Image (spheres, rainbow, N blue to C red):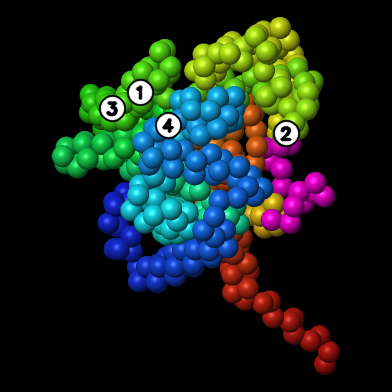
Amino acid sequence: MADPNLRPRLSPGETEGAKKPDRFWLTAIILVAVLLRAAAALWLGDRVVDLPGTFDQISYDMLAQRVLTGHGFTVAAAWWPLTPAGEPTAHWSFLYTLYLAAVYALFGYHPLVARLIQALLGGWLMPWLAYRLGRRHFSPNVGLVAAGMTALYAYFIYYAGTLMTETFYITAILWTLDLAGELGQASNEAPRSKLKIEWFLLGLALAVGVLLRQVFLLFVPILFVWLLWRSVRYQTQSIKQTLAGILIAAAVLVLAIAPWTLRNYRAFGSFVLLNTNAGFAFFWANHPIHGHNFIALLPADGPNSYRELIPPELRQLNEAELDRALLKRAFGFVQTDPGRYLLLSISRLADYFYFWPSSGSGFISNVSRVLSFGILWPFMLFGFVYSLRRSLSSETLILYLFAVVYTGIHLLSWALIRYRLPVDAVLLVFAAFTLVKLLGKLVRRGASPQPTSPPSLQT
């Protein structure tokens, strides 16, 4: 049975085949996005300092320089989270570190160059992919509005200039969802060679996302199950073809991860699939110090600081062993008091969906928060809820699955605004749908003929 909600397929070259007004406006939006992000990069400059929500860039900058000087993925001094000087680390994204190292190798030590390249790629690709998602799942107008929102979203502009994974990671997620939508609509009549390329690209997009932030790996099985469900329910492809495609994508992902698993075994003498941060994060996020109310940021120093919470008897372990030991302790917290864990997870909603200004935040943080999620969340929520009934029986379901699953992962572990940004990128499509729908109603109301006055009854 064919899906009655299927829209015409959007091929990689279809943007060029769109109407001229669409091409004009999309080009203008991308140009604005690039200029705004380049301005943010120039403002951050050719040095690396700690700004609100950007401490990770100091670590990436340090690691990139260590790689260039032949020290590999080791820390220069006693470093976060608890790694001694000169010791190997797998806490940070290998892929993003290599990106910075490559830029420094080609252009010299100029963080500004890395910022500008990132601003260019993010300013181009994120609005373009938002356009494709909006057009595929709703309409060309929704695609254009989604692209415009993505271009102007304050958080995306800010993080495009920082030496952190956000811009490339969110781009990889949008790319994954775009390819998934393409494959979810693929028919049995499609050329097999073209389908194999698309499955390969899906594997590549997944690999980029996972190598930038391993938490994305938790969504991969759900994506594959959804693609299988599409093929079974709507007969878009045969189950055999879909399974073969999933194997191609999975093989690309495994091949991308395997070298780092081998590297970790050599570095730590034990198995570490990719990064050593899940145990630390789950331990700190569910420590009894929180009680029943999650504390988004603990003190930098003192008895309740992150490092001081790590038990003294575990501090002599290497980074990989410590990560596993802390994960085990964290599961112990949950098993000991599951009710507290449930209430703690619910309390993280406020930190995850934080949108109001605060006296405890700096000017940049308040402006970024209010001028992005703060003004758009009602439109996101309306579009998300309004489209739910139709979307559960269409290919748009994958957007819902990502938003709900990704949010759930962080509510159960560690919730910060920065971790919500990939979901924001998807919810902007729903916000665009809301705005287009409201604008359409206003236009129709303004164009409706006004009733004429009744004839006078006077003689």
Name the spot of residue 228 as percent of width and height, x first. 34, 26
In the rendered structure, does residue 385 fall within the stretch colored magenta?
A: no
Q: CA distance from mark 1 to mark 3?
A: 13 Å
Q: Residue at x 39, y 50 (%)?
A: 104
Q: Residues within 10 Å of mark 2 (few under 14, many from 20)?
A: few
| Dot in front, 1 or 3 | 1
Q: Residue at x 60, y 45 (%)?
A: 54
Q: Residue at x 36, y 18 (%)?
A: 266
Q: Which residues are magenta?
A: 350-364
Instruction: Name which of mark 2 and mark 3 comes first in the sequence.
Output: 3
| Dot in front, 4 or 3 | 4
Count of numbered marks: 4
What residue did someone put label 4 on?
A: 73
Q: Amino acid at mark 1?
A: Arg
Whether 27 is drawn above or below 196: the answer is below
Instruction: Name which of mark 2 and mark 1 comes first in the sequence.
Output: 1
Q: Is residue 421 left or right of residue 209?
A: right
Q: Amino acid at mark 3?
A: Leu
The front one of 18 and 114 is: 114
Instruction: Name which of mark 4 and mark 2 comes first in the sequence.
Output: 4
Name the spot of residue 306 as percent of width and height, x first. 69, 26
Name the spot of residue 47 as percent of width and height, x first. 54, 55
What residue did someone put label 2 on?
A: 300
Q: Amino acid at mark 2?
A: Ala
Instruction: Name which of mark 1 and mark 3 comes first in the sequence.
Output: 3
Q: CA distance from mark 4 to mark 3?
A: 20 Å
Q: Residue at x 82, y 92 (%)?
A: 459
In the rendered structure, does residue 361 fall within the stretch colored magenta?
A: yes
Q: Amino acid at mark 4?
A: Phe
Q: CA distance from mark 1 to mark 4?
A: 10 Å
Q: CA distance from mark 4 to mark 2?
A: 25 Å
